[in-house]
Amino acid sequence: MVLPQWHILIRDQQRRQMDENVWSETFTDAYLSENGEWKPIKIKYRGGHTREYPKRSYEIVVDGITHHLNAEYDDPSMIRNALSFRFFELIGVPSPKTRHCLLKMNNDHLGVYLEIEAVDRRFFKRRNIAAQSLFYAVNDNANFGLLDVDTKKPKKSLFSGYRLKIGGQKDRERFETFVRKINVLKKEKIGKYLSSRLDTDNYLRWLAGAVLTGNYDGFDQNYAIYRHKPTGLYRIIPWDYEGTWGRNCYGKNCGSNLVRVKGYNRLTEKLLSAPDNLRKYKRILTEILDHTFTEKVLMPVVWQMHSGIAPYIYRDRTRKWPFPLFVGEPHFIRNYIRERRAIVLSEISRW
């Protein structure tokens, strides 16, 4: 497989300015080589703690279209995000498309990157989904709770932890009302309210995906939530699944039992407190374990992704992890699938 290449040209001064303030959200002008021609683009660093890594990730806007180029620096396999999003698609949760690529900036070869589709208006248009509003969950306060995770005091705003991407003030206020009612409605009313505001099938499938892939950070952040215009129901989309399949977000082995089978966050807790929803969640988990979260289905995907980038990873001197570790990652992921299946099957047999 031949990987596509991004070749970016940026002035030295502008590149130095980016490096001097890696946390800046301001885009810098640059150029992209495409079919032998140079076209103007906008570029900035993206991500959280990874902005201080020697190999950083980028957000690039080309012809008005946003592209995320992830270094995947902490992932020895370089495929965890891509594998996770493919898995979510297989279980019926719309997720970003991905492809591996090579990145060159001026005369510097920056190695293998993962291009991830942005979740924005174009994402919904490509899937014929009518989204009225869209919010990014950007930190741990996106836990659908009332208290700030750091101060343990009431949040100054129930929109804390989110960033508005599509919509206006009324959409934000509607979502804040949703969060508040999750927490204040009595047990006899919360079920009816959630069924009128939340696409429970989508949410439970997303929950199953986060639980099975083992994304500890995926419940209180690292997701996008949108309001489906025809139904008025909130739906959820996964984002940032590098710390999965048995490794945490720093690439360390975290075992197969890090994430509890019922997941986390206040909305999940409220939803699964209803016996009907818990039974539905068990049916969804059982269906996925029978048909999708299996070695037979997933390992061909793992091997295809892994073998496609292996020659490039071998030559990539910008990686954090040694090549022999990369070579063993399919076996590591296979072992995780086996262990996680056993853990989840044992747990739900007692429900």
Image: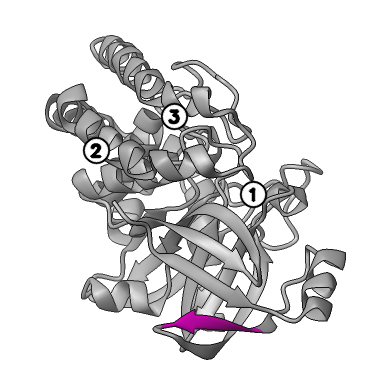
Q: How is the image coloured?
A: one colour
Quick check: is 78 in the magenta stretch? no
Residue 5 higher or lower than 110, as above or below: below
Horizontal side of residue 312 vs 136, given as left or right: left
Q: Quadrant of the C terminus?
A: top left
Q: CA distance from mark 1 to mark 2?
A: 40 Å
Q: Amino acid at mark 2?
A: Val
Q: Which span is picked out in magenta?
A: 30-34
The residue under label 3 is which amino acid type? Gly
Q: Which residue is mark 3?
A: 214
Q: Quick one: SS at disc 1? A: loop
Any part of residue 219 in sight: no
Q: Is residue 31 magenta?
A: yes
Spatial separation of the CA atoms under disc 3 and disc 1 = 25 Å
Determine the CA span between mark 2 and mark 3.
18 Å
Q: Nearer the viewer, residue 57 or 194?
A: 57
Residue 173 in which image quadrant: bottom right
Label 2, on which residue? 301
Residue type at tag 1: Leu
Disc 2 secondary structure class: helix
Quarter of the figure with residue 230: bottom left
Residue 146 is labelled as: 1
- Residue 157 lies, with reference to residue 329, above or below; the image says below
What's the residue at 48%, 50% (across, down)?
182
> In the image shown, does 99 or 132 lie closer to the viewer?
99
